[in-house]
Image (cartoon, grey):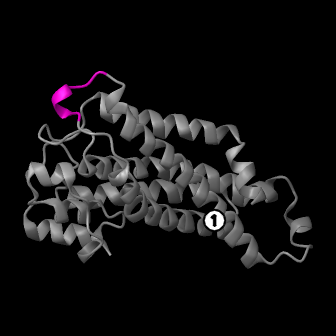
Amino acid sequence: SFELRRLVRHPAFAASLLLLGGGALTLIATGFGPRTVLLTAPYLQTQSLGMLTLVAIFVLTFFVAHAALGDSESKMQELLFATPLTRGAWFAGRCSAVILAGFAAMVVAAIVLVIAPSIVPVDPARVGPMGFGGALWALLIIVLPNLILIGAILFTAAALSGSSTVTAVAGIGIWALFWVTALLVDSPLLAGTSPPSAEALARAAVLDPFGLSAFFEQTRYWTPDERNTRLMSFTGRLL
């Protein structure tokens, strides 16, 4: 669509590629994850992309401000709705463009995650066969649903308020909601927390809107070999 082309040509889209791709590269270069898990493992790819989705909240916030508020700020909104375009079609088209632009940036981050272990200096013992299956599956069951949820909330906030400040506050609120939930349930993402109980993880899996807690709950008892080879199943509290 025209709006999608306009977003990907904006300098902020290039900045989002650098931010998310650089984040993926940093995770690999610093040896992120358990030492018993390969840097090329589906488990690590899923966890990394889930964490990068939290960064994508701020990317989508800017995209939404540009797509939803650009017309009103340039005094073009009245002219736009003088055409046969309905507000529903406008909302669906612009919101979809935001989500697709965010997803494209996350795809680039996923590609970096897959190829980086073969390029940057890392522990050779943690480098396995290069494979895109784990990253692709994570994009479909973790990243895309999250982007749809985040994009819809942010776009609704922007459309109803007409304010970039309210949109930014909504983005920060979504980000804060995840970390407050993680703190309350002693998420494995938080360094220094004790291993959460099965009951705490189950509660977190229900409360966490991003699916990362459901990921940790499902993989809690996986062996290192399973984490290196097995894909998440789209069942249980992940649904």
Q: Is residue 237 left or right of residue 19?
A: left
Work out whether residue 164 can be spotted: no
Which image quadrant for residue 175? bottom left
| Amino acid residing under circle 1 | Ser
Work out whether residue 215 can be spotted: yes
Q: Residue at x 74, y 60 (%)?
A: 1
Q: Position of residue 57 (x, y in %)?
A: 48, 53
Q: Give the residue furthest to the front.
A: 129
Q: Position of residue 42 (x, y in %)?
A: 27, 51
Q: Is residue 86 left or right of residue 19?
A: right
Residue 41 included in the magenta stretch of the image: no
Span of residues in magenta: 121-127
Q: Residue at x 27, y 29 (%)?
A: 30
Q: Residue at x 25, y 57 (%)?
A: 182
Q: Residue at x 42, y 52 (%)?
A: 53
Q: Badge 1 local density, few (<14 within 10 Å), some, or many (20+)?
A: some
Q: Nearer the viewer, residue 118 or 54?
A: 118
Q: Give the residue furthest to the top.
A: 121
Q: Is residue 97 left or right of residue 174?
A: right
Which image quadrant for residue 26? top left
Q: Position of residue 220 (x, y in %)?
A: 12, 60
Q: Is residue 198 left or right of residue 149?
A: left
Q: Which residue is mark 1?
A: 96
Q: Position of residue 145 (x, y in %)?
A: 45, 66
Is 127 located above or below residue 218 in the figure?
Answer: above
Q: Secondary structure at mark 1?
A: helix
How many numbered badges does the structure rendering display?
1
Residue 122 included in the magenta stretch of the image: yes
Q: Quadrant of the C terminus?
A: bottom left
